[in-house]
Amino acid sequence: MDDQTKQSQSPSLPTKHIDLAQAQREADELARTAQTIPSDVASVRKGILPKDVIEKLKQIEKLSKRLRSELTP
């Protein structure tokens, strides 16, 4: 087999180890937290700012960035 054939048969795998169970937990937490935001925004429209909405948004951003960096080859 020549070098070109070897390269086409063995695709390069990411060298970074991904903890898929941890990534799934983070994705689940991200989804749960994100589901609460529409009702929080509805409260804001009524003039009530839920005390934890800013923290929830920061947590969503943090989880999203972490997942993106873990899953990016």
Image: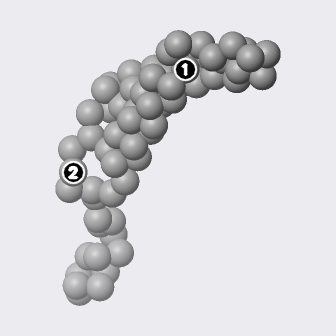
Q: Residue furthest right?
A: 46
Number of labelled discs?
Answer: 2
Q: How dense is the environment of label 1, judged by Cα within 10 Å: few (below 14), some, or many (20 and up)?
A: some
Scheme by which the image is coloured = one colour
Q: Quadrant of the C terminus?
A: bottom left
In the image, is residue 35 above or below residue 69? Answer: above
Q: Is residue 28 left or right of residue 25?
A: right
Residue under the point 26% across and 33% down: 19
The circle drawn on residue 53 is 1
Asked whether the viewer can see residue 38, the reply is: no
3 or 45, which lies in front?
45
Residue placed furthest toward the front: 47
Q: Would you identify the image quadrant in which residue 43 lies?
A: top right
Question: Residue shown at 78%/22% (left/top)?
Answer: 45
Residue 66 quadrant: top left
Q: Which residue is mark 2?
A: 16
Is the N terminus in the top left, top right, bottom left or bottom right quadrant?
Answer: bottom left
48 or 32: nearer the viewer: 48
Q: Looking at the picture, how far across and down is residue 38, in whole percent?
A: 70, 22
Counting from the top left corner in percent of width and height, residue 10 is at 29, 66
